[in-house]
Amino acid sequence: MRILITEDDAVLAEALQFSLVHSGYAVDWVSNGVAADEALKDDVFGLVILDLGLPKLDGFEVLRRLRRRNVLLPVLILSGREQPEEKVLGLDLGADDYLVKPFSLNELQARVRALLRRGRQGGVAPVILYGSLGFDTVSRTASVNGRSLTLSAHETGVLEVLLNRFGRVVSKEQLVEQLYNYDREVSQNAIEVYVHRLRKKIAGAGVTVRTLYGQGYLLDYVNH
């Protein structure tokens, strides 16, 4: 899952980025509102963490423009403004959550997980289950027949994207967009390696990753 951080405080932004990357997310960071507005025109993010006091274009205007484009991307406002009227305005403009600085990284992570769950086709249960393949969306861990799987961060990311689109084709390009930030140059061959490893690890779960040549990958039941 790919997250955009908009924050002009470099120290805070780097701490947020480190924490989220450590949890397995791909993270991009921009430091002003104009850059945020431009980045959000690309349909590659699963969530945006939005500061209000951005230079060049404030967070309220970034949010206003985002919703005018009818983009339903989950938005978590992260701000030092704790006045009730600021919170009301942010939520009325279309933010999904509002967290006041200072905050704990654990709370931020929990709110991110909740928003990402809520944003998936109206929300999903904490544990996704297809066949005997289970995926805990809180801990981001997978299991087959109750046995925990050892997955790399990239394998976990591939599985998460495919689970969220179960029964639908996901192209290699979409996987690259979801798993890597702008600073990473990644070959599509790497995606093939992750899918191959993942397919072997979920064998026996009653589901498999099918390769549709020229189209992409499909997570589906084995007998379909």
Image (tube, rainbow, N blue to C red):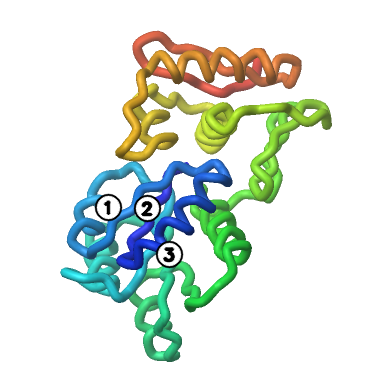
How far from the left and from the top, in percent, is residue 7?
Answer: 34, 64
Q: CA distance from mark 1 to mark 2?
A: 8 Å
Extreme residue toward the front, this view: 11
The 10 Å Cα crowd at callout 1, few under 14, some 14 to 19, many 20 or more, is: some
Q: Are marks 3 and 2 in contact (CB under 8 Å)?
A: no
Vertical order, 168 against 117 (above or below)? above
Among numbered discs 3 and 2, the one appearing first in the sequence: 2
How far from the left and from the top, in percent, is residue 40?
Answer: 27, 52
Q: Nearer the viewer, residue 135 or 69?
A: 135
Q: Which residue is mark 1?
A: 40
Residue at point 42%, 29% (across, down):
175
Q: Tell me: 139 left or right of 117.
A: right
Q: Tell me: 108 left or right of 91.
A: right
Q: Nearer the viewer, residue 136 or 36?
A: 36
Residue at point 42%, 54% (across, down):
47
Would you say residue 166 is visible in this rendering? no
Q: CA distance from mark 3 to mark 2?
A: 14 Å
Q: How many marks?
A: 3
Q: CA distance from mark 1 to mark 3?
A: 21 Å
In which quarter of the view is residue 219 placed? top right
Q: Nearer the viewer, residue 102 or 51?
A: 102
Which amino acid, mark 3?
Answer: Leu
Vertical order, 220 against 109 (above or below)? above
The 10 Å Cα crowd at callout 2, few under 14, some 14 to 19, many 20 or more, is: many
Residue at point 72%, 19% (across, down):
206
Which amino acid, mark 2?
Answer: Leu
Q: Which residue is mark 3?
A: 12
Secondary structure category for the residue under label 1: loop
Secondary structure category for the residue under label 2: strand
Quarter of the picture containing the C terminus is top right
Which amino acid, mark 1?
Answer: Leu
Would you say residue 193 is visible in this rendering? yes
